[in-house]
Image (cartoon, rainbow, N blue to C red):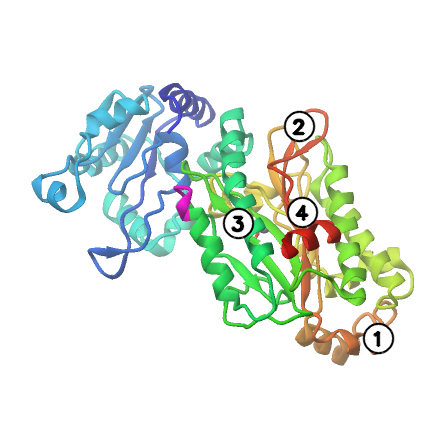
Amino acid sequence: MFDPKVYIKRRDLLKKQVSSGLILLLGHEDSPMNYAANAYHFRQDSSFLYFFGLDTPGLAGVINVDEKKDILFGNDIDIEDIIWMGYLPTVKDRAEDVGVKQTASLNDLAGILQEALAKGRPVHFLPPYRPETLLKLEKLLGVKPEEAKAKASTALVRAVVAQRSLKTEDEIAEIETALKTTYKMYITAMHMAQPGIWEKDIAGRVDGLAIADGGATAFPTILTKNGQILHNHAHGNLLKKGDLLVVDAGAESPLHYAADITRTIPVGGKFTAKQKEVYEIVLAAQETAIKAIKPGLKFREIHLATARVIANGMKDLGLMKGDVEEALLQGAHALFFPHGLGHMLGLDVHDMENLGENHVGYDDTVQRSKQFGLAYLRLAKELKPGFVLTVEPGIYFIPALIDKWKKEGKFTDFIAYDKLAGYRDFGGIRIEDDVLVTKEGYKVLGRPIPKKPAKIQEHVEI
Ligand code: GLY
Ligand code: MN
């Protein structure tokens, strides 16, 4: 974990941002996979980690804004825990590690919260997303599970988003650590991307590297020759020459900061001429987007500038036609680029998405569009130094979407449907990097992972 001063500073700032009452931050429990003692890999709640730093189940934190004190709630382990799970320092000792002076047993938590409520003091909590947390909120505060999201504190959400959005040097170093592992994952994936190998063989090795470095993957690895299915987690295909392998993966650092990279690798190392044409458009779009990043600019503008590169490229290939600006305005390009350019990155791969995408990626100056494609943009607002975000444009040929739009007679002025027949089995291409917004502009984080066709080929053929 970080130095205790880091957590003290974060909690103190939160006290200033949330003007009164108690802030309740619930840690996670072990979640059973098929019986209680056989749990899923434990992952602490990211906001609990951010403010209280402790990475084990069964903890809760209360920040008393009015009395300016922090309390850690947890139960000390007993001999049975020691026999089965090993030794763990006392809650008091662990609290000291994160700069918390006061501790109490979990049994005392409900009483303290109820006492505050009885005195008319607000108890702020974040929108819950795990069933165990919903049940705890009901038990502790009497909030019904179906009402818990609506009753979450907007003031607390805003304050947490404000703090967690601005990454400190320590946090950026953690993301770099995650990227160091991720670099190895990609070099391995490239080396293994040979005809005759199964997707699962590569996925197993890639995920194993994340575990071997003491963390885990930050999200389920996408490694597929069906890259046109955006969140495709199946790894069941045998690869052959000519396949395009989309790998969207990232490690978590030991302190749980995420990396999120995508590369599209031609199986065997060499793109066909047709693949290369589309690949170069995605690469140009990604490089245009990265170079545009600077504080003060809305990410939505950068998304639209990227879409322009894609639409112009598709027109050059004869797959789009007509007035590009009008096509962009109407959203015709979203047939090929149906998702947003990127999202915040931090303790979560889609950072703070559980707090509400509109709180994280939008503000009073920019409202979410309802247009297909643009509506999926997770980050649209003005960029500030300290934001870390992904830049991940793509071009996909999704037969079901092409057929639907064609049948509906949609955008016939802009889409050359007749030319798309030859692309139905193309798949998809995405390229993604993680970028820090600096005072001057941007910094691409991590050791560069090959993305120029010749460099990828070199790494496949090694
Ligand atoms: N890495 C998966 C995503 O960004 O959605
Ligand atoms: Mn991503």
Amino acid carrying label 4: it is Pro
Q: Which residue is mark 4?
A: 450
Give the Cα separation between the discs numbered 4 and 1.
31 Å
Q: Secondary structure at mark 2?
A: loop
Q: Residues within 10 Å of mark 4 (few under 14, many from 20)?
A: some
Gap in Å between the C-alphas at discs 2 and 3? Answer: 27 Å
The quadrant of the rendering that contains the N terminus is top left
- Relative horizontal placement of residue 368, taking residue 72 as reference (left or right): right
Observer-nearest of 43 and 404: 43
| Disc 4 residue lies near ligand 2 with CB under 8 A | no
Residue tagged by mark 3? Answer: 185
Q: At label 1, which amino acid type do we have?
A: Lys
Return the mark for residue 438. Answer: 2
Determine whether label 2 and label 4 are within 8 Å by CB. Answer: no
Say what amino acid the circle numbered 3 marks: Met
| Residue at mark 3: C-beta within 8 A of ligand 1 | no
Residue at (17% x, 34% y) in the render: 105
Residue extending furthest toward the bottom? 407
Percent coordinates x, y for residue 64 in the rendering:
32, 25
Residue 262 at x, y percent in the picture = 61, 52
In the image, the segment drawn in magenta is: 211-215
Cα–Cα gap, marks 3 and 1:
37 Å
Q: Are marks 4 and 1 in contact (CB under 8 Å)?
A: no
